[in-house]
Amino acid sequence: MGALDDSDLDRLVAEARDRMRPVEQQLAQLRAERDVLLTEKRRRERLANREARAGLKAAFKEGKFPTVAELVAAEDSGSLDEYSYNWKTGGEVRLGFPGARAQTLSFTDGVQAQQARDLAEAARLYAAGWDLGSPGRPGVRVHFPGTRQERLVPADEVFARPRDAAP
């Protein structure tokens, strides 16, 4: 290559560009085709997600799954992780604080607060007259999986379904 003069080098660069042009056009067409297919895939995933959430919301209205308040009142043993939790909108949530290793439910007697790490402890606190929430703030603390976004929502707006139950 060192023996080539500038005009020969320019000619070789131009020839290489000419050979590349059809390949670049074909690559652009393939990328466009891929993008159309990925858009269709995302559309189908959104539709399936919307239908699943609609099905969950209908099941909630029919009373197929208990609310967290009903679960605490009815169960006296078991793990909180035996259930999947959904907010009334159908979106999946986890109980307690974001980033916590285990799900928890907060209870209050009006003055103090205590965390229940399982249904046995929740049943014990509930039987002792404690309510879901913290002093002055009734409800269930939930967060959206994979985020730091949390909310305190009424206990009758969070539904529990066994993990093995289909959504």
Image (spheres, rainbow, N blue to C red):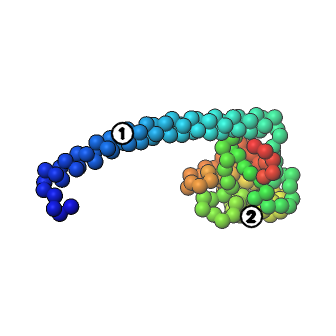
Closer to the camera in the image, 10 or 153: 10
Closer to the camera in the image, 34 or 51: 34
The disc at residue 22 is 1
Judging by the rendered image, the residue that carries numbered circle 2 is 117
- Coordinates of residue 71 in the picture (x, y in percent): 81, 51
Quadrant, the N terminus: bottom left
Q: At numbered mark 2, what does the secondary structure look like: helix, strand or loop?
A: loop
The amino acid type of the residue labelled 1 equals Pro
Mark closer to the chain start, 2 or 1: 1
Residue drawn at x 59%, y 55% as measured from the top left: 146
In which quadrant of the rendered view does residue 32 lie? top left
- Coordinates of residue 29 in the picture (x, y in percent): 43, 37
Closer to the camera in the image, 97 or 19: 19
Quadrant, the C terminus: top right
Q: CA distance from mark 2 to mark 1?
A: 63 Å
Q: Dot 1: few (<14), some (14–19), or many (≥20) neighbours within 10 Å?
A: few
- Coordinates of residue 38 in the picture (x, y in percent): 54, 40
19 above or below 96?
Answer: above
Closer to the camera in the image, 16 or 135: 16
Q: Is residue 131 visible?
A: yes
150 above or below 63?
Answer: below
Q: At numbered mark 1, what does the secondary structure look like: helix, strand or loop?
A: helix
Residue drawn at x 65%, y 39% as measured from the top left: 49
Q: Dot 2: few (<14), some (14–19), or many (≥20) neighbours within 10 Å?
A: some
Name the front one of labels 2 and 1. Answer: 1
Residue drawn at x 84%, y 52% as measured from the top left: 73
- Coordinates of residue 51 in the picture (x, y in percent): 69, 34
The amino acid type of the residue labelled 2 equals Arg
32 above or below 129?
Answer: above
The disc at residue 119 is none
In which quadrant of the rendered view does residue 41 lie? top right
